[in-house]
Amino acid sequence: MERAMLLRSLSSSTPTRLFSAATRRLLTRRNFHSQNPNFSKPASLLRHHSILRPISSLSLPLPPPPSPYSGGRRATFSTLSPPAVATSDSAATSEFGKHDVEFAEKLGFEKVAEQFIDECKSKAVLYKHKKTGAQVMSVSNDDENKVFGIVFRTPPSDSTGIPHILEHSVLCGSRKYPLKEPFVELLKGSLNTFLNAFTYPDRTCYPVASTNTKDFYNLVDVYLDAVFFPKCVEDKWTFQQEGWHYELNDPSEPISYKGVVFNEMKGVYSQPDNVLGRTAQQACLSLILLSPFTFSYLVITNEKVGSLDFEALFPDNTYGVDSGGDPNVIPKLTFEKFKEFHQRFYHPSNARIWFYGDDDPNERLRLLSEYLDKFDESSAPNDSQIQPQKLFSEPVRITEKYPAGDGEDLKKRHMVCLNWLLSEKPLDLETELAIAFLDHLLLGTPASPLRKILLESGLGEAIIGGGIDDDLLQPQFSIGLKGVQEEDIQKVEELVVTTLKKLVEEGFNSDAIEASMNTIEFSLRENNTGSFPRGLSLMLRSIGKWIYDMDPFEPLRWEKPLMKLKERVAAEGSKAVFSPLIEKYILKNPHRVTVEMQPDPEKAAHDEAVERESLEKLKASMTEEDLAELVRATQELRLKQETPDPPEALRSVPCLSLHDIPKKPIHIPTEIGNINGVTVLQHDLFTNDVIYTEVVFDMSTLKHELLQYVPLFCQSLLEMGTKDMDFVQLNQLIGRRTGGISVYPFSSSVRDSKDLCAKLIVRGKAMAERAEDLFNLMNLVLQEVQFNDQQRFKQFVSQSKARMENRLRGSGHGIAAARMDAKLNAAGWISEQMGGVSYLEFLRDLEEKVDKDWEGISLSLEEIRKSLLTKKHCLVNLTADGKNITNSEKYIGKFLDSLPDFSSEPNKWNTQLSSHNEAIVIPTQVNYVGKAANVYGDGYKLNGSAYVISKYISNTWLWDRVRVSGGAYGGFCDFDTHSGVFTYLSYRDPNLLKTLEVYDGTGDFLRGLELDNEALAKAIIGTIGDVDSYQLPDAKGYSSVKDFKEFADAVDVVKDKGVVVAVASPEDVEAAKKINPDFLQVKKVL
């Protein structure tokens, strides 16, 4: 959701890699590009996008959130909403939908296997469609959040990005739904809980989810028609729009490349971490690699790689190319190859189809048969086979360059990552699970030895590589550092190897083993996927094996392998279990690729010059007639993009009516109690014996000069030791006794008030029998941790600085949004001080200050503790079943009584940044363009229609003009109804001033809008699907088109008085200043 992107809650505890992909697959999905960049990834379960390899997204982008969330920033206490609740234990015995085998046979399906999956309390039946060979997994249970997905194996042979472009394109109209963007129409008028598509390196997934059965089957039908009968294979315009095309508006102007995927991948290739991850994958997973070389360590330099075609370099493995598309190669893709790829791989014979939830399993098969029966069996399963990579006989080294800022200090800007391909064949589940535990032991927490030793070495600023990745056919292990000096590269490599050798010899201590076992087992049993549908998490887990023709049931059944592993560790000892794994799969494995990334301040300009020169040569070779034809084609494409679909085409997309919407909002039981003078919010819900709690402290008493220390204070609480325990022992104790503790700040404006809300939140969870341990450990963290470890604190500063610099490149729209908020209200200023450009500048200064004034910094941290962590103005939020809530009250009381009982006078937070327009310049090939204003300040009074209208603007005007016509990966708006700030943002945008012109045209668009009752109802339904029901105003507020036209005056405030912040390339900022010299103040950050 657009609003979620702007959430002001900043996660300040160290981002913890809880699980490898082997274990994360038990919870959720990763490694893809999504069709909808607007969908929220549960960050605690996913790695950063630099290592996420699925490749695309149809809607609106989000930066990785600090923690799973869904409510956006409207809700002052959105962080206190009860967590996802486990399925009731009654599900184990309830009668699920009957799978009628006789009915299935009549429809042409044969039952292959049936199992009851205790771990998710589901009956799972595997069918095969007899005519085509399509495989169907039908999972039945009492989960109302129904999930459908269809997955094709789609191995590319080059880096033109065919799978990625096709994933975007098939959802641009089909046989039954012949409009330009059925996907967008679904976004407008569905109650979906998930609607997206992702491209992996070897497969493409199309999942949907909804709690409304009618809506669910509508979504399934649109997606099935889209993948099997898309218009894009007959319509070259879609290929040009989503993939690439030449654009020329006037013969006197230069030719440029445009295309949504083209610009998306330019953004991806602007991020050093992404380039490193892709380089490692392509090298590690795809050798036939120049085997005639006889020396023992093969070295490939940047210059050589740049001149070699990956198709020639890696002829026998699909992972040697980029399924997302290399911007230098995408323009080589032809429409004919694009069509052929769809015909070859988008066939039922090559499909894995998944259903999950409480709907009728027979209806699932009936709906499928209508599509599958139209096809005969094909050779696609053989054509799409993924060939395994043979292990190297010798290591490989690759040196690449990445774009660095002009004038940037390049001394500590190198990156180095060691990557191993672990096996020629997929691992059995028991070994895979053991390696997942090993990965957690090595890297999963700040106390994990490999992670700790690398960071404490002082050789680099932050960990890269991410450990085990087993989402593809063959598992990999990657680890390294960024922020390294060139002369220390070899030292990093040696440190990784020597640390692993030492762990083989000495093993892990028993507390570390117990903590890892408890952490992973807790998460598996909790099965809390946040806002991510559980059924989709299970689907992606199953697909990880199923797509390679292995058992789709096996990944769902983790209980026995887990118990077997625990028994083996208990019987043989952890050293006997884990040391051989390190030795066999890493230390004695010659298939190692070391990737070194070197900063190059001239690379960005060089890449732009190469592209410009290529296009200039093309133009020089064209006749006047050719140029005139290109201008005509550009205009024709734009006209098609901007011409509305005819009413009959729009009506073809199925939509719910207002009568289909539940009349009552979802009820979350909340009882307000009091324990020892402190307010306690209690939510009596079934949680499978897990207790969730948040303790909230008021930040209004904090001095302004201490504010920027708060994120580091939060991290220090969890990653420094006490008088009796070092931080490793404390971290392991938390892992052994609880499901985790986190600490982070939160701020928001307060609706209808000039006041603001600024809180420090301590969140924890544990099994009910561990409630006393949970509150004792929270007390220990808050009151007994000592701020006396100077070197660790300096590590925190360096890590935070590296994360902020990476966020600037990958999530520039989030940086722009925070900066604009800071110019418009005090709550925004607070957030920006703790997570924006101002915070990055603070960290850079603090890195030097740590050595000069550690005593002063330590005293500041202690002053924050004294100021914030008091019983006064404290609030407790507790979610569990009634019995466990009652049993926990005595432990809560003891915890609260241990807190200091005093309060300081609150401070006035009324600071804002200067309101001038700003260009934040970074080395990038794409831009992030924002404009915002406070519409309350000019008299707008909140109406329920604002939710509907802001979403409508995103899904129509901004989608069509910023994404479809403009070529950006995303364009959207957000209305923060607490502060009154209305914000426009674009993502991976080739334009700057043109995008601002689109924003300024929004008011005229609304005034000229004509909506019939059907379109209005669709807009309302789509909004209800986004907004928490209990937060919705009365539906009467949505009743009139008049509201849309009146809202035009509100958005004109942004046009006339709005502040602009663009995170942009030097070239585009310079071009903008030539047109309007005084429009932007330039701030060079990277």
Image (cartoon, grey):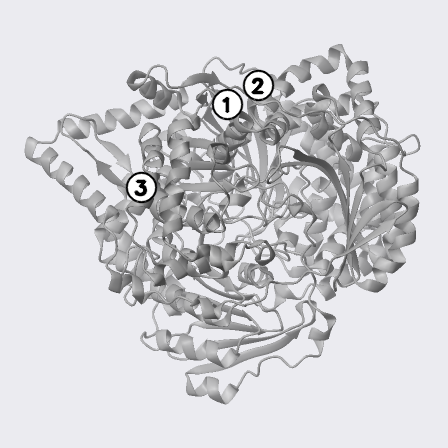
Contact between labelled residues 1 and 2, with CB atoms less than 8 Å apart: yes
Disc number at residue 486? 2
Q: Is residue 1042 above or below residue 87?
A: above
Image point 61% across, 22% down: which residue?
911
Q: Which residue is mark 3?
A: 961
**Nearest to N terminus: mark 2 or mark 1:** 2
Mark 2 → mark 1, Cα distance in angstroms: 8 Å
Q: Residues within 10 Å of mark 3 (few under 14, many from 20)?
A: many
**Quadrant in which residue 624 is drawn:** top left
Q: Which residue is mark 1?
A: 598
Q: Is disc 1 placed on a helix, strand or loop?
A: strand
Relative image position of residue 675 (x, y in whole percent): 88, 49
Amino acid on which disc 1 is placed: Gln
Amino acid on which disc 3 is placed: Arg
Q: Residues within 10 Å of mark 2 (few under 14, many from 20)?
A: some
Q: Is disc 2 placed on a helix, strand or loop?
A: helix
The answer to whether residue 969 shows anywhere in this view is yes
**Nearest to N terminus: mark 2 or mark 3:** 2
Amino acid on which disc 2 is placed: Glu
Q: Residues within 10 Å of mark 1 (few under 14, many from 20)?
A: many
- Mark 1 vs mark 3, foreground winner is 3
Relative image position of residue 448 (x, y in whole percent): 75, 38
Mark 1 → mark 3, Cα distance in angstroms: 38 Å
